[in-house]
Image: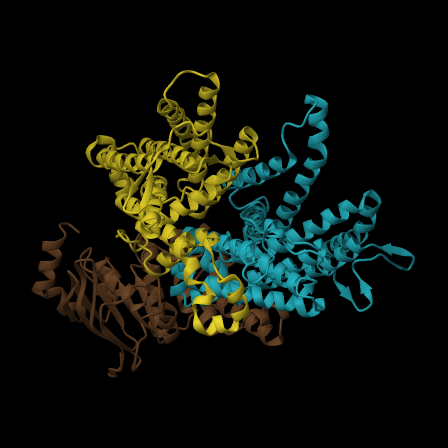
Chain colours: A cyan, B brown, C yellow
Amino acid sequence: MNRKILGFVLIGVALLILPHVLTQVGTAWVRIANLAILFIFLSLGLNIVVGMAGLLDLGYVAFYAVGAYLWALLASPHFGLHLPFWIILPLGALLACIAGAVLGAPCLRLRGDYLAIVTLGFGEIVRIFMNNLSTPFNITNGPKGITGIDDVSIGSISFATTDSFFGIPFTGPVKYYYMLLALLLLIIIVNLRLQNSRIGRAWVAIREDEIAAKAAGINTWNVKLLAFAMGASFGGIAGGMFAAMQGFISPESFVLHESIIIVAMVVLGGMGNVWGVIAGALLLSFVPEILRYTVEPVQMALFGRQLVEPEVLRMLLFGAALVLTMRFRPAGIWPESRHRREMSEARGAGA
Amino acid sequence: MSSSVAVLLEACNVGKSFGGVQALKDVSLTIRANEIYGLIGPNGAGKTTFFNVLTGLYPRDGGEVLFDGRALDLANPYRVAEAGIARTFQNIRLFGSMTALENVMVGRHVRTRAGVFGAILRTPGQRAEEAAVKRRAQELLHYVGIPHRAEALARHLSYGDQRRLEIARALATEPKLLALDEPAAGMNATETAGLRQLIEGLRADGLTVLLIEHDVKLVMGLCDRVAVLDYGEKIAEDVPAVVQKDPKVIEAYLGGSIGG
Amino acid sequence: MDIFLQQIINGLTTGSVYAIVALGYTMVYGVIQLINFAHGDVVMVGAMVAFTVIMGVVGMGLPLPPFMIVLAGVLAAIPACMAVGFLLERAAYRPLRHAPRLAPLITAIGMSIILQQVALLIWGRDPRAFPQIMDNPSFAIGGAAISAVQIAIILLSVALMAGLTWFVYRTKFGIAMRATAENVNIAGLMGIDANRVIAGTFIIAAALGAVAGVMYGTYYGIAHYTMGFILGLKAFSAAVLGGIGNLAGAMLGGLLLGLVEALGAGYIGEFTDLCRWPVVSAMLAERCAADGHVVLFGSNYQDVFAFAVLILVLVFRPSGLLGERVSERA
């Protein structure tokens, strides 16, 4: 037990130092780390829906978009509004939650594979609206997107500038890193606590056998809607952070591929297991970045020109992750703890 | 048994058809409190259909069910569970990758309240409820005789243990009526004897049991009263000794399934 | 020009393409209850292969009639797509035949991504313009125009549908297919090799997809590595609208969806023109006076119709227009 606590402390310290180390390598790497944390956050939000409740949501990016656009509209020159983050972020979560409930309500009676396609359709509808709600009234500014989005600022500390605390420089991306880390900690706790709770068990029961769950007294429709709405609200928070971090959003950032990337992270890591999902998200965030920095020079050295773009490799990697995981390790690289708990029990019985 | 004839469940003219086939034709039956009531009939007689209608899994076409003096809301299975009817399935339906203990804890869902925020904030109320749920689930595993399998995944239990686990999960909903769909199917003689003991124990503890069973010997030995379905119609309802001699029943069985 | 009739003609044309793609979804779903998410990308491969062949033949400068050149494209696309369909089934789906329902769907999504990226590697990121080699005269009918390509697409679709119906109901393989769709285990007991039937179904679906891909490419004059996604989603919606698993349903659903889309896109602008509605137009008096129209939703919302149809059908009549199998098999 003590070793476990020690391990957590070490990981914690490493995570706190990490951005300063990465800054030495290049600020770009801090941004990559930030996006990775954002994707872990999204994966853990989707894990509630896909992993625990077993509802394959292929339109998750729609809620991410809702949060991002809300932030962009309420904190940018577009409407001339500049509300503070502690109003927008909860509002984004709430709006995404409502969107989740509204979209979920009609389709949660559907069987799993149909639900997947319908959520995908919803995701497309949201994208089409983002693209076209520039006329006759300019709400989203269409495909051009919204620029000049405000950074987060807490009191007098703006995330747009560099400040020094105790002689250590904190650049904008580093500040975002810490904020994202705090949000990540929050969603990890939410995931872990829900997993072993009345509602979490109900979700897993529905995933395992919906008819038996009904007969065992679970109001499956309500409980599924809850999963959908909760997952959506975390998507909304992530979207807000994304908009603030990037300073610019457009419908391009919220295409189906993004949804599939998040699904791939959850599936590869191990549906339902928090640590597995984190591992999956980390793997699928960093491997493509490493590829981006290695593939090009290697190709240049070997062939004298670039044959395969890194972006293509990245998507191929996600596709392959989905196919190969389902084929060889359907429970993911790090399966749900329930499986492991039993393994240890079996060993105990054998001894 | 005492002479009290308190009625627990009264089904009136329950009907159900699939496409053109009438699976249940105006089935009426009465189950008294604290009895073991058997529902038998040849294959395809409509026994399981009746179960599915009674527990809200199939919408019914007609009829009413009074349960514990009130009209039963059959539109939603969870309402049925709430009202106090729990069931098991003919082809065992457990939550395979949950542990045995968790399976039973799911059964407590309908009798507990904790929501998302309680769970996230770990409120004292939620923690107390969670502990109580766990304690009760452990008791129930003990009750059905598989306390040592609490941490095993449901899908890794032996067949007989899975049946027991399903009963424990059903009991966790605090039912007044426990409906068992062919609980002895696929069991060997020892397992069947154990099951019989378990059911008798349940009755001794005040429960009412509705039993669908193919094993005629088990039904006749165990049940206080028996109803016989044939082609979706009730053709007899009485104590086993009388039903056994009913010419219509003999005809249904001998004419219906040869050597069955 | 008669807008209504014109939209009907346009709707029937795209609807015919949807119908042929929808047949692919519905056949596979009928046999193994799998939404072959990658089917749209198979269609894309068909369009791309045909494009390459047509460009190649045109480039060689052979004195062939244009019709023959397009035919060469189709004849190359069909076997290419059949091979892709076969590989999909064999490598990706067959190993998951007994896995939980979502596993093959997730695999299908993965295969869709892989097919798109491979196509991107081969044919590039930019849309490929189909060479306009055929004369495409238009004929006037009742105040609207129908082009030769439109006529060809509609006729070819009808022929394919008739051919497929004959195949499924009259040939030995078709009967085996229907038996497998009914109950794969019992079909097995009757001596039907389910693996062969399923592989065959994928191959036939892919062949139809190839033809649809060429039709789509010729009609819109363009092929792109992502074209399969929206086309596939719409065709799937069409299959669901007609009743998934039902061949006649897929045809009906495809045509209806094409019509809904064309008429919807044709009229939505008019209906959502705020200047037409008294109360709102009073509020917008200035803009209405300046522009004459303040259109809330224009024809750029065309793609929304297919998804809206899909959602409405699934919510209110999940079995579709012609579907019967309502209850889930326990």
Q: Give left or right: position of A50 versus A25.
A: left
Quarter of the figure with residue B172: bottom left
Q: Is residue A202 above or below residue A300?
A: below
Looking at the picture, how far across and down is residue C274, in whole percent?
47, 66
Considering depth in this image, is A247 or B58 the residue closer to the camera?
Answer: A247
Looking at the picture, how far across and down is residue C126, in whole percent?
56, 35
Looking at the picture, how far across and down is residue B184, in whole percent?
30, 57
Q: Give left or right: position of A91 versus B110.
A: right
Residue at coordinates 35% horizontally, 60% vertically from top-left? B194
Quarter of the figure with residue C79: top left
Q: How many marks?
A: 0
Considering depth in this image, is C134 or B164 the residue closer to the camera?
Answer: C134
Residue at coordinates 70% horizontally, 22% vertically from top-left? A304
Considering depth in this image, is B198 or A105 the residue closer to the camera?
Answer: A105
Considering depth in this image, is B209 or B173 the residue closer to the camera?
Answer: B173
Looking at the picture, how far across and down is residue B123, in whole percent?
62, 74
Residue at coordinates 67% horizontally, 53% vertically from top-left? A38
Task: Let me know if residue C243 appears in the view.
Answer: no
Q: Is residue C124 above or below residue C325?
A: above
Quarter of the figure with residue C135: top left
Task: Let me know if residue A240 appears in the view.
Answer: yes
Residue situated furthest front in the rendering = C289
Q: Is residue B100 above or below residue A299?
A: below
